[in-house]
Amino acid sequence: MKKNFIASVEDNASGDIEQIAGQLRLQGCTIKQVLKFSGIITGCSSGKEARLEDLKISGIKHIEEDRELGALGDE
């Protein structure tokens, strides 16, 4: 199942963020944004991996599911 994700890169790998995003693309991910200044990559997984942690390649510090949040009472 495809999942939207947010990945933060290691502090010492921020200069390589475009290459890290490229490696994620090679794994079948769709990259939505590469935020160089903050060291964040957002995208969608290929759906072939068992869990998002399987996408945690060299240079990625954290990866988690990107979920939409609503205000209290929203349906």
Image: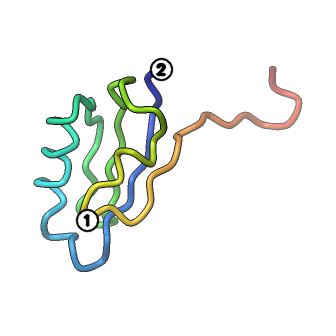
Residue type beneath disc 1: Gly
Side of 32 relative to 73 (left or right) = left
The residue located at (43%, 23%) in the rendering is 2
Residue sticking out furthest to the bottom? 12
Q: Tell me: residue 72, above or below residue 20.
A: above
Q: Is residue 36 above or below residue 51?
A: below
Residue occupying image coordinates x 30% and y 77%: 11
Q: Where in the figure is residue 33, as x and y percent of width and height? A: 28, 42
Question: Residue 44: which quarter of the image?
Answer: top left
| Numbered label attached to residue 59 | 1
Q: Is residue 15 left or right of residue 41?
A: left
Q: Reading the chain from its start, which is encountered first: label 1 or label 2?
A: 2
Q: Residue at x 19, y 47 (%)?
A: 21
Residue at 25%, 65% in the rendered image: 59
Q: Is 7 situated above or below 13?
A: above
State the quadrant of the C terminus. Answer: top right
In the depicted view, which residue is nearer to us: 53 or 75? 53
Residue 10 position within the rendered picture, expressed as x and y whole percent measured from the top left:
31, 72
Residue bearing mark 2: 1
Mark 1–mark 2 Cα distance, whole angstroms, equals 24 Å
Amino acid type, residue under disc 2 in the picture: Met
- Vertically, is 3 above or below 42? above
Q: Quadrant of residue 36?
A: bottom left
- Label of residue 2 in the image: none
Crowd rating for badge 2 (residues with CA inside 10 Å; few <14, some 14–19, many 20+): few
SS state under label 2:
loop
